[in-house]
Image (tube, rainbow, N blue to C red):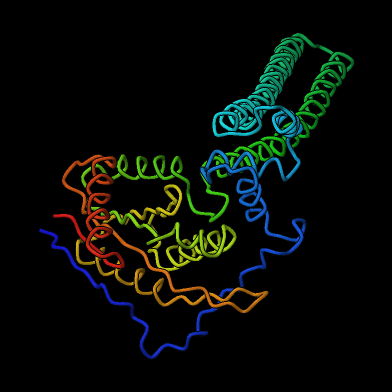
Amino acid sequence: MCKSAGEPNYPRNGLNPNSELDMIPSQTNESEGRDPGARALGFLADHRLASTPVNYWVAYDYLGGDNARLDSAIDEALASAVGLDDFVMREIYDQHVSGESFRRFHGMGEDIDKLLSGLLDDVRTVDRCTSDFRASLTENITRLDKAQDPAGLRTVAQNLLQASVAANASNAALQKDLEATEQEAQRLRNELDNHRREAMTDPLTGLLNRRGMEIETARMFDSRPGSDAAMLVIDIDHFKKVNDTYGHAVGDVVIRKVAETMAEMAPGEAVTARFGGEEFVMLLPGASCDAARTLAEKVRTAIARLRLIRRHDKLAIAPFTISVGVAIRAPEEAVTALFDRADKALYEAKHGGRNRVIAAS
């Protein structure tokens, strides 16, 4: 059995308050000088929109100015009597963000189709050249058997030489085409990898997003169907109070610092993700109950020790903490069931006083 463990006290004694410093940008800077994430959150706040992943993504793309169709849709909504709300933002996301991703992949599919067509043409060319060379070789060998004088032998030799020169020229051209095709294939592979990473990555923290976590954990469980694993579900305590007190720009920094701490302390094979909002997940393949709980305590302690100071007014941000739910994978347990148990343990930690680790039975 994996028993629960808790440590409700803040581990602050003996620490230099400036030993771990994060310089938070001023929220009063001009918008063009601010962090893009802070600008996106400022846009949402200005229009009284919730900081949901969909709203954040749409605002981020709009302020970036790289999606003309999305920009036009936002401008039209702002100019209308309806304005912007969660429903309109979702509609814009479906039409101009997820749809744009589909168009990118569709375009890459066309490029790949052209690449494959070119390869097939090259294969057909090789086949024709090989067949022509083989036919010429067979014909001239037959002539060689019948040749009775030097002139006839010379003719056969010339024919064979011409056939060899033609075959070599064809092979050289084919080699050049194949080199160009290989370069194009590598470009498409890199572009596809970039799109895949973008689709699976949370733009604020650089961790996997929820979809990325689902894909990676499913892959891990499929490759190790009966292996042990532990899951940590992490939530920032009283995060709404952070946003209400210091603003969303500071809230962004808090989220990033939690993500950085998790990434720094995670073992090599761990899967770390921002599940949504202020909630994070860490999957630890092969971890025991004690190892998972020990790591959770280390992450909790490290975050409780963080000290942030806002740059423009030197305001010390109040310390913040996390609560953690831990669950150990049962034999053949699906990732969704494992997450549910870890999430319930997190719920116990939150309602048991926060700033603690609770492990599910």
In front: 265, or 142? 265
Give the farthest residue toward the right.
151
Q: Position of residue 212 (x, y in %)?
A: 46, 43
Give the farthest residue toward the left.
1
138 vs 119: above or below: above
Q: Residue at x 42, y 69 (%)?
A: 320
Q: Residue at x 73, y 45 (%)?
A: 64
Q: How many marks?
A: 0
Give the farthest residue toward the bottom.
14
Relative to 29, 295 lies left or right: left
Q: Residue at x 74, y 10 (%)?
A: 139
Among the 4 quarters of the image, the one containing residue 264: bottom left
Quadrant (top left/top right/bottom left/bottom right) for the N terminus: bottom left
Relative to 316, 179 lies left or right: right
Relative to 273, 199 lies left or right: right
Q: Position of residue 22 (x, y in %)?
A: 57, 74
Among the 4 quarters of the image, the one containing residue 88: top right
Among the 4 quarters of the image, the one containing residue 334: top left
Give the farthest residue toward the front.
81
In front: 99, or 49? 49
Q: Residue at x 89, y 15 (%)?
A: 151
Q: Position of residue 62 (x, y in %)?
A: 70, 40
348 vs 177: above or below: below
Quadrant (top left/top right/bottom left/bottom right) for the C terminus: bottom left
In front: 281, or 186? 281
In front: 154, or 109? 109
